[in-house]
Image (tube, rainbow, N blue to C red):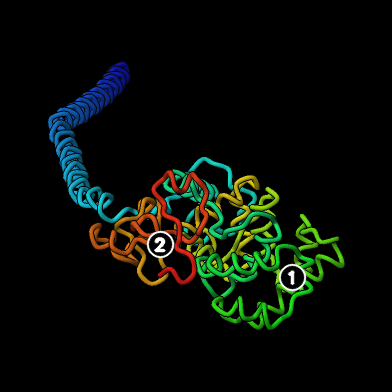
Amino acid sequence: MKKAASAKKAASVKKATSAKGAAAKRAASAGETGSAKKAASAKKAASAKKVAPPKRAASAKKAASKASVAEKASKGAAVKKAPAAKKVAVAPKKATARIKGTAPAKAVVHPPGDESPTALVRRARRINRELADVFPYAHPELDFENPFQLLVATVLSAQTTDLRVNQTTPALFAKYPTPEDLAAANPEEVEEILRPCGFFRAKTKSVIGLSKALVEDFGGEVPGRLEDLVKLPGVGRKTAFVVLGNAFGHPGITVDTHFQRLVRRWRWTDETDPDKIEAAVGALFPKSDWTDLSHHVIWHGRRICHARKPACGACPIAHLCPAYGEGETDPEKAKKLLKYEKGGFPGQRLKPPQAYLDAGGKPAPPLGAG
């Protein structure tokens, strides 16, 4: 019995020992596996570290290549832009760039093209300032000594030149110096005097009719209000503003054919109706500038910016004009297109202001003098 018990005890001890050994082996194998995994991960990290520099180098090379491409592109752009810089002197760049960071002008709601309202106002006012430097002596090109003479001369200037009117009115005012005299005139005698102006019958009717209206409604005096002037026969807004601006000093915009052509050519407005043109252009300038603005634009249209052949090559505001190139761009050829004092020829007034004469302008010859 004792032998059997000891044998069982020995067997159980042996079994426990073998179980411990198996556990130790499993622990050892697990440790080996963990260490192997750690070693593998360490090797992998090391290899990653070894591979990382080439990747960074590749990205650095890529960035460098991009930088070089950008540099080449910028150089190419600079090379391409170089001719444009040269063209500014010969063919001025269009002044239609949008100005950022500025509040839009409330007066201009729909500027033509891609020009912002603020940019349009600035360009328009700059054109007027530069024209003022070119034509500091600009004035109405009709001879007159009082509001009545200016009113009659402006009515007669329709469908003819100011020069022809100036050559005709001396005889008319010598015979009929006042509204009372012209109101009582024989129409046939007036027609004979006004024949050189063209449409002389219609113009005779107008000047006699407005003279009668002045005598009957305004005591023989020319009224100084727009609403009164436009009631006179043959007098519209254009004529009224000529009289108000130059005889009474009240600001007004004279929208004649030259003014209409140039403001559309400069893209100040795309309107075609005179009243709408007046409103659109008037919104670009302070009211105090309106009368002188009219003179500057009209003078420029008569002397340089002609309807058929603009003298673009001799234009002082070519760098601000979106329509540059519509006319002759060669400076020497353009100079031959200049008219009046800019071309060395007499102006349209027989009795121009002294400032005009001081600037080199020449008075026009009287009727029949050549």
Residue 269: x percent and y percent? 54, 62
Q: Secondary structure at mark 1?
A: helix
Residue 57: x percent and y percent? 14, 34
Q: Nearer the viewer, residue 356 or 263?
A: 356
Q: Residue at x 62, y 57 (%)?
A: 144
Amino acid type at mark 1: Leu
- Viewer-side label of 2, 1: 1
Q: Nearer the viewer, residue 185 or 244?
A: 185
Crowdedness of circle 2 by 10 Å Cα count: few (<14), some, many (20+)? many
Q: Nearer the viewer, residue 189 or 147?
A: 189
Residue 248: x percent and y percent? 70, 50
**153 lies above or below 98:** below
**369 lies above or below 23:** below
Residue 169: tell me if it is visible: yes
**Quarter of the rendering occupied by the N terminus:** top left
Residue 34: x percent and y percent? 24, 27
**Quarter of the rendering occupied by the C terminus:** bottom left
- Dot 1 corresponds to which residue? 182
In the picture, measured across the screen, residue 197 lies left or right of residue 127, that is right
- Dot 2 corresponds to which residue? 305
Q: CA distance from mark 2 to mark 1?
A: 38 Å
Q: Which of marks 1 and 2 precedes in the sequence?
A: 1
Residue 140 placement: quadrant: bottom right
Q: Residue at x 28, y 19 (%)?
A: 13
Residue 126: tell me if it is visible: no
The furthest residue to the front: 175
